[in-house]
Amino acid sequence: MRYTPSRRVLLGGIVAAPFVLAVRARAELAFTDFPFALGVGAGDMTATAVILWTRLAPRPFDPHGGMPTKPVTVEWQVARDARFKQTVASGSEVAWPELGHSVHADVTGLTPATRYFYRFTCAGETSIVGTVQTLPVAGSAIDRVRFAAVGCQHFEEGWYTAYRDVAEQPLDFIFHYGDYIYEEHDKRPRAPDGRPAMPVRRYSGPSPFTIDDYRVRYAETKLDADLQAAHASAGWYSTYDDHEVQNNWASVWDEDGDPPEIFLYRRRAALQAWYENMPVRAKPTANGVVDFRRRVDYGDLARFHYPNTRLYRSDQPCDDGFKPDCAGRHAPTQDMLDAPQWSWLDEGFRSSRQRWNLVPQQVMVAIPDRREANATTPIYNMDSWAGYPAAQAKLLGIFARHEPGNVVVVTGDEHRNYANDLIHDDRVVASEFVSTSITSGGDGAVGSDPAPILAHNDFVKWINDKRGYVLTEITPDHCIGDYRVVEAVTRPDHPVSTAARWGLETGKAGLKRA
């Protein structure tokens, strides 16, 4: 999309034309450092359009990323080949200082089901090349789709080795379920066994509160080469969860009990920073909301429903955390989604004609009892759907009404791999692939024992405590989750392997080893 003149850019009282602004950028900017240090990305693909992203930051930790406080024109190109001999689209966007000099180019008029290559240029500098694939036409015959579910990538707790493996996979897209950054800054880091431990690497400052704080936190994260490779390797559908703002926030409530009107200042800064740093189509509204909810059809094969389980939910019950049951869990007002999302989700399932329906979202839908082996009182994770049992039953009711079934939830947040069946009215109505973290939790808890959870929850089929991601393959006949794991993330370059494969056959409920 080419730049439309705005009243914000004036030259001698006359609105600056796009070519004037471009000349001005070339004439006045002379980068001494690489302006595309944070990489490139693409996302929110449709059959004929993609969002291309970059953010100018030649010195990412300096004020304004080392950029002047003025708008700068960035040019982009899209081609059918990596050498750009067959360029099919080009244009320019203005990188505004108010948005951290980020670029979100909405490139339209593309051919469906086609792989493209893209790059950016500014003031004589050229970015790395990324690649992205447009979606097939809705309803067209498709025989396979493959995507990776990734997230929970605490910068201080490990190397992003799994992202290198993601970048090497032949994927149609990548789904990020949240926790791209972590706002936490542990001054006394400890290993999972409680002993003192040195972090793999350190954030440079304390927990972020302002837009500048969050921008630096993203810059530190995005400088990782393996993460940049994953962004450049495929288009992303990105969602946020809690750590992009603050641990376990819910709607207007934060973890510390601050007044909502105060927390909203922090939430607004955090969500703007998320937008500035992700290849997303959703823009911040006037009141600071960024809502990524979307529905994506992949031909006749799969429909993807991406709800927002963080922005509209009720506050966590039972004082949050891993707790025994309490009356608050069952309050009539306790909900995970808002009314418009429930209507949107229900309509999306009712109108679906795809073979499979998938719900990629942020926190685990299954409600396991997490008590220890010899304990008698059930324990639940109040920040997951377990804190909202009536909402979970409503969600599973939507799944149960959908025929012929073939419903799969894909999520993360747990820092563990899970393979779950989802049961409603004593029958399996869907299954759930829970992807472990990229790094959060380090190498995994010492002596971690899944036996108590498996013993108390027959719908949990398998648990694994390594880091990595889930690679999901969908065909007309099956949906298979390949649980890819890294032996260790506290040291670089460990190999990535498959820990297990769990799957479903079309028309047959319940997970089985694949």
Image (cartoon, rainbow, N blue to C red):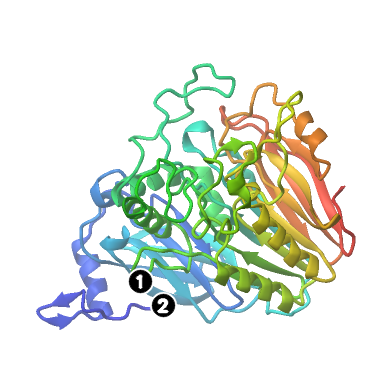
* x, y percent for residue 334: 57, 56
Residue identifier under label 2: 1
Kindly identify which residue carries mark 1. 93
Q: Are marks 2 and 1 in contact (CB under 8 Å)?
A: yes
10 Å crowding of disc 2: few (<14), some (14-19), many (20+): some
Q: Is residue 440 above or below residue 267?
A: above
* Residue type at tag 1: Glu
Q: Is residue 470 above or below residue 376?
A: below
Gap between marks 2 and 1 measured at Cα? 7 Å
Element on which disc 1 rests: strand
Q: Residue furthest right?
A: 508
Q: Is residue 8 above or below residue 147?
A: below
- Would residue 179 appear left or right of 405 to someone viewing this image? left
Residue furthest top in the image: 195
Asked whether residue 247 appears in the rendered view, the answer is: yes
The furthest residue to the front: 327
Residue 84 rendering spot, x and y as whole percentages: 51, 68
The residue lying toward the viewer, choosing from 346 and 11, is 346
| Residue at 41%, 31% in the rendered image | 202
Q: Residue at x 29, y 65 (%)?
A: 96
Expressed as whole percent of the image width and height from the top left, the position of residue 131 reads 56, 62
